[in-house]
Amino acid sequence: MKQTNSKTIAVVGIATIAVILIGIILIIYSFTKLFFSIEKEVSAAIIATMGTILVSVFSVIYTKYLEKKRLIEQELRDKKLPMYELFVNYWFDLMYKKKLTGKAMEEKEMVAFFKEFTQGLLVWGSDGVISKWSDFRVKMVNNKDGFNERFIIEFEELLLEIRKDTGHKNTKLKKGELLGLFINDIEKYKK
């Protein structure tokens, strides 16, 4: 019984599609026949009018598409910026807290940062930033050598990816320039 119903539905579906296609072909045929039966001046005017209308319609549709795309990108950027600012604030606090307050950052603060940042990154981060953060975090956890050259270069690549995700081109930044903003002896790592 079920097989018969499926076959009937399939036949009805194919017949409906065939009727629609035949109807479209007949409409196109009728318009073509009508178009060739009128004078050339009138047909030229019809073509020009149709072209103008189509260009206008497609222009409006394309403009709306671009507006929507820009709006979505702006909304995403608005969500990403606080998260990336949290990231930068954390690293500056980690580097300077002991110099400024005499106390190093506590593990509790570090864990809170990692939780909040990773949670935000999961939802709002670009593929590139997520990939760089994942690589960097794993290397940071497994790092036994301290702040070595490889570790620093990975950190700069992560920072550059974050800048890229927020709209910066990074085309004029050379290796080590970003880190040189806060690492005094960056020259020894740039080799």
Image (cartoon, rainbow, N blue to C red):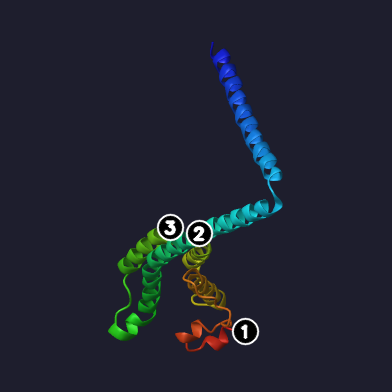
Say which label, 3 or 1, has the lower sequence index.
Answer: 3
Quarter of the image that includes the C terminus: bottom right
What crowding class fits label 2: few (fewer than 14 Cα within 10 Å), some (14-19), or many (20 or more)?
Answer: few
Tell me the amino acid under the disc marked 2: Val
Left or right side of 118 for 40: right
Mark 2 — residue? Answer: 60
Tell me the amino acid under the disc marked 1: Lys
Q: Identify the residue at image location x=41%, y=57%.
A: 123
Quadrant of residue 113 within the rendered picture: bottom left
Where residue 142 appears, x then y in whole percent?
Answer: 50, 65
Q: Nearer the viewer, mark 1 or mark 2?
A: 2
Q: Nearer the viewer, mark 3 or mark 2?
A: 2
Which numbered disc covers residue 122?
Answer: 3
Say which label, 3 or 2, has the lower sequence index.
Answer: 2
Q: Nearer the viewer, mark 3 or mark 1?
A: 3
- Whether residue 183 is visible to the viewer of this picture, yes or no, is no
Quick check: marks 3 and 1 in contact, CB under 8 Å?
no
